[in-house]
Image (spheres, rainbow, N blue to C red):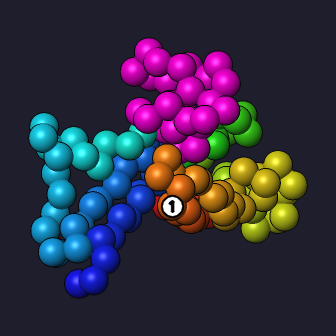
Amino acid sequence: MDTPLLCIKIASGIGAGIVTANGDVYRGADGAAGDIGHIRAVGGGDVLCACGNIGCVGALASHRAILRSLGIPETTGEDPLHGAHELAQRVANSDPPAGHRTTPGERTHVNPPGERTHLRLLTRRTT
């Protein structure tokens, strides 16, 4: 393997897996290297996270956050996957707010040393 690999999972929370250029899984000093959902997002505003902090990535971009922003309950008594079903239906019906919240977006982040990293976030998968 020539380069490291970063895989980001967006579901009820946000996590990541990191594989080094040598092919080793990177776990970090305390085993939480991929726990990225509680990194504070630039421009995260005043969105309260379940951890008690403000502006965490997971509070802004997780499946739960998208459902919450659209006013869709995650579950109902009849359907434990109500949120996923409703969001998928809204996207399929070209609902503008749902489409806006689930459209892949590309952001460019400039690292302190001047290197550029492209990050593509895909949130269209809901189940």
User: Left or right: 97 with respect to 75?
Assistant: right
Determine which residue is flagged by label 1.
115
Tell me if residue 67 is in the magenta stretch. Answer: no
Give the side of residue 63 with respect to residue 29, left or right: right
Reply above or below: 63 against 40: below
Q: Quadrant of residue 88?
A: bottom right
Residue in view at x 29 percent, y 59 percent: 17
Three-letter amino acid code of the residue under disc 1: Glu
Instruction: Estimate the x, y position of residue 21 in percent, counting from the top left.
Output: 23, 73
Q: Which residues are magenta?
A: 38-62
Q: Main secondary structure of the magenta part?
A: loop
**Residue at the front extreme of this rendering:** 113
The residue sitting at 58% across, 53% down in the picture is: 110
Q: Secondary structure at mark 1?
A: loop
In magenta stretch: residue 42: yes
Farthest-out residue, top: 52
Q: How many marks?
A: 1
Q: Please state which of residues 63 and 90 is positioned toward the viewer in this rendering.
A: 63
Report whether 92 appears left or right of 84: right
